[in-house]
Image (spheres, rainbow, N blue to C red):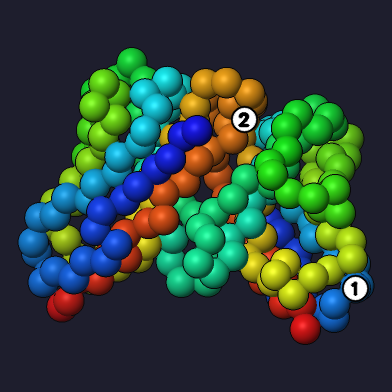
């Protein structure tokens, strides 16, 4: 069984550009979560999608947005990139939205120059 | 506001030693606590999930305990191996707002020397 897959593995952008990151959850999982892991800041919760709806978002500006598709895959969009957006972006999925183990992908390393 | 702390930040032990990693949290109103490992440049691998009603969980050489009232969890690794070298993260899923908004500690970097 395939795990959570993320693409691309690495992404290099310049300040002001837009980045799109993609995530495919484990088959049968309906909840998808996005986390940011920046150097020195640890893992920070970004967004949670379940059944196509945004259920919660962390303390990030509106230029961080996303969506979940009918097949439960998800996209994270970051507009107007800033240097401090450079980080490892991790996607996770779970079978049910509450009180479940989270399974993480290997992440997308975003570098903003 | 829930805060999660892990001590020590780094640990180096010889192969075969038993070791304990510590995690503390400030708000005892949690659904569960999870332990993960992260290898360099990689995602997280779920190790153990302890429900708030449970005291411990075991998987192979790993044993995690939870004392909700004191806001503490420990991860015990028996007979450590070089392959255990990684960063270990604990995370709590708190009441209030949405669940599954895990609050992570900053991790313990473990090095097991052959």
Residue A87 at what x, y percent from top left? 65, 68
Residue B60 visible in the shown view: no
Quarter of the image for residue B73 reads top left
Q: Is residue B38 above or below residue B2?
A: below
Q: Is residue A94 above or below residue A110?
A: above
Q: Is residue B55 left or right of residue A9?
A: left
- Label 1 neighbour load within 10 Å: few <14, some 14-19, many 20+: some
Q: Is residue A87 left or right of residue B59?
A: right
- Mark 2 or mark 1, whichever is nearer to me: 1
Q: Is residue A54 left or right of residue B74?
A: right
Precedes in sequence: disc 2 or disc 1:
1
The residue tagged 2 is: A95
The residue tagged 1 is: A16
Looking at the image, which residue sits at the far bottom? A113
Residue at horizontal 72 percent and vertical 67 percent from the top: A85
Label 2 SS: loop
Residue at horizontal 66 percent and vertical 60 percent from the top: A89
Residue A3 at what x, y percent from top left? 61, 50
Closest to the observer, A96 or B9: B9
Looking at the image, which residue sits at the far top? B53
């Amino acid at each position: 069984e395939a795990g959570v897959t993320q693409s691309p593995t690495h992404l290099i952008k310049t300040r002001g550009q837009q980045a799109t990151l993609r995530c495919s959850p484990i088959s049968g999982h309906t909840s998808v979560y996005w986390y940011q892991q920046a150097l020195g800041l640890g893992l920070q919760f970004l967004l949670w999608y379940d059944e196509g709806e945004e259920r919660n978002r962390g303390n990030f500006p509106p230029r961080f947005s996303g969506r979940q598709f009918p097949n439960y895959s998800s996209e994270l969009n970051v507009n107007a990139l800033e240097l401090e957006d450079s980080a490892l972006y991790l996607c996770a999925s779970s079978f049910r939205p509450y009180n479940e183990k989270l399974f993480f992908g290997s992440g997308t390393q975003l570098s903003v120059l | 506001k829930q805060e999660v702390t892990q001590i020590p930040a780094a640990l180096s032990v010889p192969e075969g030693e038993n070791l304990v990693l510590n995690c503390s949290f400030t708000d005892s109103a949690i659904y569960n606590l999870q332990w993960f490992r992260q290898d360099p440049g990689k995602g997280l691998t779920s190790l153990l999930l302890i429900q708030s009603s449970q005291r411990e969980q075991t998987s192979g050489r790993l044993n995690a305990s939870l004392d909700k009232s004191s806001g503490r969890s420990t991860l015990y690794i028996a007979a450590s191996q070089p392959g255990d070298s990684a960063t270990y993260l604990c995370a709590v899923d708190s009441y209030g707002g949405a669940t599954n908004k895990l609050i992570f500690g900053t991790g313990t970097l473990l090095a097991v020397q052959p």
